[in-house]
Amino acid sequence: MKIVIDWDLCLGSGMCAGIAPDLFELDSEGNMSVRIETPLEDRRTSLETAVTCCPVEAISVTEAG
């Protein structure tokens, strides 16, 4: 699976980083980044929760391959 961010939509709310800090990071200036673009399957649950909780639906997941 691969994390896809629509940077035009992302507000940098940090909800994803709060839910899955091993996958997302919010720096001190409010800039969001993806730590692991293609996470292992064991991270799916937290990733799907982050996708669902994003207030602007900027995060999606594609199946790599």
Image (cartoon, rainbow, N blue to C red):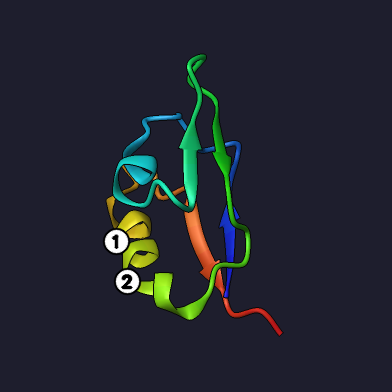
Q: Amino acid at mark 2?
A: Thr
Image quarter in which the C terminus is found: bottom right
Query: In the orientation shown, which residue stands out farthest toward the right?
Result: 65
Q: Secondary structure at mark 1?
A: helix
- The kind of secondary structure element at disc 2 is helix
Q: Is residue 55 above or below residue 30?
A: below
Residue at the spot x=63%, y=59% of the render? 37
Query: Disc 2 designates what residue?
Result: 45
Do the CB atoms of the residues marked 2 and 1 lie less than 8 Å apart?
A: yes
Q: Can you say whether 21 is above or below 3 in the image?
A: above
Judge from the rendering whether residue 22 lies leftward or rightward of residue 8; answer left or right. left
> From the viewer's perspective, is residue 21 above or below residue 50?
above
Residue drawn at 48 percent across, 16 percent down: 28
Residue 58 percent coordinates (x, y): 48, 48
Q: Amino acid at mark 1?
A: Thr
In x, y percent, where is residue 1?
57, 75
| x 36%, y 52%: residue | 20
- Whole-percent x and y of residue 61? 52, 68
- Front-most of 44 and 55? 44
Residue visible at 60% across and 36% down in the picture: 8
Q: Which mark is residue 49?
A: 1
Q: Residues within 10 Å of mark 1 (few under 14, many from 20)?
A: some
Q: Is residue 20 left or right of residue 37?
A: left
Distance Cα–Cα, label 2 vs label 1:
6 Å
